[in-house]
Amino acid sequence: MKVDVLLGLQWGDEGKGKIVDVLTPQYDIIARFQGGPNAGHTLIFDGKKHVLHTIPSGVFREGTQNVVGNGVVIDPVIFKREITQLLEAGVDPRPNLYISRRAHLIAPTHRLLDAASEQAKGKAKIGSTLKGIGPTYMDKTGRNGLRVGDLTSGKFEERYQALRTKHLGLLAQYPDFEYDLESVEAEWLAAAKELGQLQLIDTEHFLNEALDSGKRVLAEGAQGTMLDIDFGTYPFVTSSNTIAAGACNGLGVGPGRIGEVIGIFKAYCTRVGSGPFPTELLDETGEALREAGGEYGATTGRPRRCGWLDLVQLRYACRVNGVTQLAMMKADVLSGFDAIPVCHAYEHAGATTANLPFGIEPDEVTPTYSDHKGWQEDLTGVTTVEGLPVSLHDYIAMVEKEMKIPVKVVSVGPDRAQTIQR
Ligand code: GDP
Ligand code: IMO
Ligand code: MG
């Protein structure tokens, strides 16, 4: 069997959690391969809303195994809180939850370093979620990191102290940054101990053996392609590979084992945090999209920046991920517009281009738009392809023609049930 990968094609928050939950009955295992608690994946069903940060979105379907792969970074305190919230919702994720020994731990000092770095950057800040993601991946590639497997190795205390000492030295370089490590450290150490009692395994063996025995695996991405460390709008990105290739090194499966690559995009665009966003709407239309779409961060509550669909950006994302099928989210939010502008090309360096260039700051590219006929109908109760308005069919056909990839899923509301498979 092969691993299918589901990932975001824009700047995150495309609705990955919802679609993973919808698709989970078709899989035996759901595996997160990168990112950490910077992610916020929202699932809504039976009138209840759940937000997951580190735990895979397969957790609500009985019998599904959920894997946190080596590419993920884990904050034990947030992980523990997620488990507690699931228990309160009547779901015990622990029997079916497997955590890679090779996954890295986010220490309290990683969070402090994230905050200190952002504060020092002032106006140039990344707009990080302040979960310690950047510093943790820096320690991973810098070969100083602390891993889940260290928790049970007998060397945890020694390794933790070495990292702590290093971090206190780094924090001294930010004299304006005030912090209180003691107030959070005890809780973190207790949560780390509890994490060590969960099912810690060598997920690379587990997953490859599962595939060999015919099990179906879905890899769940976090963030989005434009936040990828290599292909995103650097430096306004996260610190991991969010693209399909990230599933290989974040899970330990070979490239030949990747099957379908399911790319998720909103029928418009959003971004939270700093960095370029060519089709951003800084006017009341942007405001209207934010309100209609409930565009407030699932992790930080920050208002998301909103803009029109950008096909230059989407084409680039389909290319670097090798997307084989698309899912279009939040079509319902666009109801009520007479015309919907869509960006088909950029003016860049005196020419028109359909290929996303190196830089997409406002002084580097100007998006050019063409109008598409809007739809007035409320889509939130539509349950069949036939029930969708003609102009939405045309909008989807336009995307399929430009991307040369089929749109297999159309989402018309946040609930699990508001999903139409084509
Ligand atoms: P993720 O990070 O990709 O899982 O996405 P988030 O959960 O951060 O953000 C997606 C938001 O849109 C959540 O509030 C979802 O409940 C909501 N949502 C998902 N699909 C739809 C949809 O088709 N229509 C509407 N109106 N909301 C949706
Ligand atoms: P999901 O999985 C949207 C953004 C942050 C910031 C940048 C770097 O829910 O789609 P970081 O904390 O990673 O150092 O922040 O990336 N960001 C996200 N934006 N959705 C996410 O995750 C995000 N995770 C990080 O806002 O601009
Ligand atoms: Mg999110």
Image (cartoon, rainbow, N blue to C red):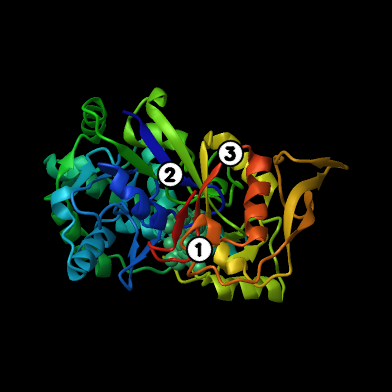
Residue drawn at x 39%, y 63% is 417
The mark that comes first in sequence, 3 or 2, is 2
Dot 1 crowding, Cα within 10 Å, few <14, some 14–19, many 20+: many
Dot 2 crowding, Cα within 10 Å, few <14, some 14–19, many 20+: many
Tell me, yes or no, if residue 363 can be seen here: yes
Type of amino acid at the residue the image marks with label 1: Val
Where residue 421 appears, as percent x and y from the top left, is: 46, 51
Quadrant in which residue 51 is drawn: bottom left
Question: Label 1 to label 3, Cα distance in Å?
Answer: 20 Å
Q: Is residue 257 left or right of residue 283?
A: left
Where residue 329 appears, as percent x and y from the top left, is: 52, 57
Tell me, yes or no, if residue 36 can be seen here: no
The mark that comes first in sequence, 1 or 2, is 2
Q: Is residue 186 left or right of residue 227?
A: left
The mark that comes first in sequence, 1 or 3, is 3
**Residue at the spot of label 3:** 405
Mark 1 lies within 8 Å of ligand 1 (Cβ measured): yes
Residue drawn at x 19%, y 59% is 191
Dot 3 crowding, Cα within 10 Å, few <14, some 14–19, many 20+: some
301 vs 146, nearest the viewer: 301
- Return the mark for residue 412: 1
232 vs 142, nearest the viewer: 232
**Residue at the spot of label 2:** 6
Tags 1 and 3 in contact by the CB under 8 Å rule? no
Mark 2 lies within 8 Å of ligand 1 (Cβ measured): no
Label 2's element?
A: strand
Q: Is residue 161 above or below residue 288?
A: above
301 vs 152, nearest the viewer: 301
Label 3's element?
A: loop
Tags 1 and 2 in contact by the CB under 8 Å rule? no
Quadrant in which residue 405 is drawn: top right
